[in-house]
């Protein structure tokens, strides 16, 4: 069977990783594939060749599939390229499954996303569906839980949610003054940490799109669906990465598992215990320092990598 939901595939300069993720996409046989790619950096002489090789991977499509491309001739950088590319992709479709070139999904990831995109299509409380699980064990008997943390290593969403996205986070000064952000977090430490991150993002000191996306989720009290079993492995850790250079990171190449028949939670409520674990062990500054072991440039990152 073919996957009905279109896939947005973001790639750049790592053809070997791109091939591996493409093979997983090919197994799902989506009816539509939207490919987003940044252009080579002028100060990286070998990058033009690598970008061309990465883009050429999609020429291997051998099933009935509508392919649209959004390739930049110049390097736009992580923030602008992914933000503009996903905006373009959501103009093509109301719903998308989104993969980057280092996010290798389990085969069951696609059906999981497609089923939940349909189930929560009209539920304004849900902003996205992620394939990531960083928990040490299952938290419930259900197949997934709700979280305030928008993990983006393999995810899905709706145009109605992406329309809330503003890469410039223009409303941040007003939102900061209202202190509404405090209600989104479990402690003063979390609030101060993310306020500082958003200050830096607003000032243009951080070149990424994922913090503005997290901000959009928080502004709208939006929740993320996270699976009880990890469905996506980040295979991009290593010396070629911009931010995730340490292959020994606890988040590198995490094992993926079949999720099976979905068992839905009875209520739409965030799992505060799971979220607290994520804050203390994955996202807080001490956790980032421990995980990176002094080698990864993890400065306050959800995804800890440069996708563009």
Image (tube, rainbow, N blue to C red):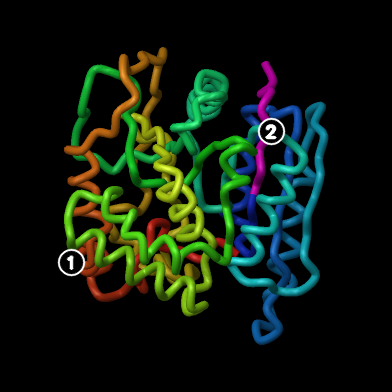
Quadrant of residue 246 within the rendered picture: bottom left
Nearest the viewer among 241 and 202 is: 202
Quadrant of residue 31 within the rendered picture: top right
Q: Position of residue 120 (x, y in %)?
A: 50, 23
Is label 2 in contact with label 1 (beta carbons under 8 Å)? no
What residue is drawn where x is 55% and y is 28%?
Answer: 110
Element type at marker 1?
Answer: helix
Name the side, left or right, on which 106 lies relative to 101: left
The numbered mark at residue 94 is 2
Element type at marker 2?
Answer: loop
Distance between the Cα atoms at labels 2 and 1?
A: 39 Å
**Which quadrant is home to the C terminus?**
bottom right
Q: Position of residue 29 (x, y in %)?
A: 69, 28
What residue is drawn where x is 28% and y is 34%?
Answer: 270
What residue is drawn where x is 50% and y is 31%?
Answer: 124
| Residue 143 is one of the magenta-drawn residues | no
Circle 2 residues within 10 Å: few <14, some 14–19, many ≥20: some
| Residue 5 is one of the magenta-drawn residues | yes
Nearest the viewer among 30 and 17 is: 30
Going from the N terminus, do you reach mark 2 or mark 1 first? 2
Nearest the viewer among 48 and 201 is: 201
Which label lies toward us, 2 or 1? 2
Q: Which residue is mark 1?
A: 286
Q: Position of residue 191 (x, y in %)?
A: 25, 60
Circle 1 residues within 10 Å: few <14, some 14–19, many ≥20: few
Which region shows up in magenta?
1-9
């Amino acid at each position: 069977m073919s996957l009905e939901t279109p896939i947005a595939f973001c790639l750049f300069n790592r053809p070997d990783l791109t091939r591996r993720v493409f093979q997983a996409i090919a197994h799902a046989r989506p009816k539509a594939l939207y490919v987003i790619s940044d252009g080579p950096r002028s100060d990286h002489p070998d990058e033009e060749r690598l970008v061309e090789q990465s883009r050429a991977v999609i020429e291997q499509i051998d099933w009935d599939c509508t392919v649209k491309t959004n390739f930049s001739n110049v390097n736009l950088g992580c923030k602008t390229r992914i933000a503009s590319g996903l905006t373009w992709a959501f103009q093509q479709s109301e719903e998308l499954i989104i993969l980057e070139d280092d996010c290798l999904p389990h085969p069951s990831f696609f059906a999981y996303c497609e089923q939940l995109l349909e189930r929560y299509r009209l539920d304004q409380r849900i902003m996205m569906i992620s394939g990531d699980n960083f928990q040490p064990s299952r938290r419930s008997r259900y197949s997934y839980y709700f979280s305030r943390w928008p993990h983006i290593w393999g995810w899905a969403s709706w145009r109605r949610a992406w329309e809330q996205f503003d890469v410039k986070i223009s409303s941040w000064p007003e939102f900061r003054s209202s202190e509404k952000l405090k209600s989104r977090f479990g402690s003063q430490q979390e609030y101060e940490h993310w306020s500082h991150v958003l200050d830096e993002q607003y000032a243009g000191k951080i070149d990424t799109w994922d913090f503005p996306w997290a901000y959009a989720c928080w502004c709208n009290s939006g929740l993320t669906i996270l699976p009880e079993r990890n469905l996506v492995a980040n295979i991009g850790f290593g010396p070629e990465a911009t931010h995730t250079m340490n292959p020994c990171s606890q988040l590198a190449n995490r094992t993926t598992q079949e999720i099976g028949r979905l068992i839905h939670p009875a209520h739409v409520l965030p799992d505060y215990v799971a979220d607290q674990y994520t804050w203390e062990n994955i996202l807080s500054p001490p956790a980032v320092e421990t995980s990176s072991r002094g080698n990864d440039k993890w400065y306050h990152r959800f995804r800890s990598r440069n996708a563009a």
